[in-house]
């Protein structure tokens, strides 16, 4: 089990109560349909798509937090060194949780010098052993060119491996790649599918993005409203 609990609060970066927005979209689309105002509908569609695309560039949170072991940021140096020694030993033994956690320390600069290249290397070691959080983190690093050269194809590969393990944050990340068309051909149906998988696990940003996409196409408005209320 990882020593670093993930923080859900960062998912609320783009979160807001979208109930009124969804209801408003339904009213606007009904009016547009009656009046045949295609230009107005195009403006609405452009606005919604712009919101989703802009959201793509908001950095998703990586797993952060403080160790659940006895070591804290105020621990005596001896205790911290002993904990690091145990963690490093586990890394050398090829334990994926330890590789992930040590990668976190290097990414955050906690107890060790900040080193994004080393963080990426350790995430990749854990990812290759099937560690879902590490897979998602290295996918983000390939997407953003952080600690590694930017590579959308590798980003998609690792997002998919993590998403296939039902990790909501990876499902959300993969959905955005399909929604925007980074590393893959743009595919709104697949984007909606992966957003839905993440939303059903309570991922707030996935709920919002899916609600917007459904509102854009004037479909599933009851479900869109439900997700907006939940977010």
Image: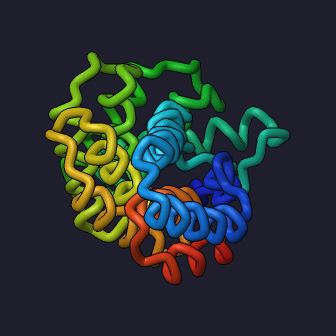
Coloring scheme of the render? rainbow
Which residue extends farthest right?
74
Counting labels gives 0
Q: In this view, does 29 lie above or below 109?
A: below
Residue drawn 72% across and 67% down? 20
In the figure, is residue 226 to the left or right of 50? right
The answer to which quarter of the image holds residue 150 is top left
In percent of width and height, residue 70 lies at 72, 56
The location of residue 59, given as percent across then percent down, is: 54, 35
Residue drawn at 58 percent across, 81 percent down: 226
Nearest the viewer among 19 and 180 is 19
Place of residue 15 in the rendered image (x, y in percent of width and height, measured from the top left): 67, 55
Q: Residue visible at 63% across and 36% down?
A: 81
Q: Locate the C terminus by quadrant.
A: bottom right
Q: Position of residue 198 (x, y in %)?
A: 42, 67
- x 67%, y 46%: residue: 13
Q: Quadrant of residue 217?
A: bottom left
Instruction: Indicate left or right for 172 with 14 as reference.
Output: left
**Residue reaching furthest to the front:** 35
Q: Can residue 2 be seen in this view?
A: no
Q: In this view, does 156 lie above or below 109?
A: below
Residue 189 visible within the image: yes
């Amino acid at each position: 089990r990882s020593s670093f609990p993930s923080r859900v609060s960062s998912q609320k970066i783009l979160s807001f109560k979208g109930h009124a927005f969804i209801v408003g979209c339904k009213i606007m689309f009904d009016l547009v349909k009656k009046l045949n105002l295609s230009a107005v509908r195009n403006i609405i569609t452009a606005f919604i798509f712009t919101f989703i695309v802009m959201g793509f560039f908001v950095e998703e949170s990586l797993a952060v937090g403080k160790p659940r072991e006895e070591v804290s940021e105020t621990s005596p140096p001896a205790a911290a060194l002993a904990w690091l020694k145990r963690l490093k030993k586990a890394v050398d033994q090829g334990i994926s949780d330890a590789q992930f956690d040590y990668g976190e320390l290097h990414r955050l600069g906690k107890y060790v010098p900040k080193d994004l290249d080393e963080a990426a290397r350790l995430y990749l070691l854990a990812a290759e052993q099937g560690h879902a959080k590490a897979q998602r983190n290295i996918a983000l690093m390939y997407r953003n060119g952080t600690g590694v050269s930017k590579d959308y194809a590798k980003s998609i590969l690792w997002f998919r491996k993590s998403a296939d393990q039902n990790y909501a944050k990876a499902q959300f990340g993969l959905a955005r790649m399909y929604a925007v068309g980074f590393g893959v051909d743009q595919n709104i149906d697949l984007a909606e599918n992966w957003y839905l998988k993440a939303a059903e696990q309570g991922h707030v940003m996935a709920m919002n993005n899916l609600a917007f996409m459904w509102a854009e196409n004037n479909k599933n408005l009851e479900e869109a409203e439900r997700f907006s209320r939940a977010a």
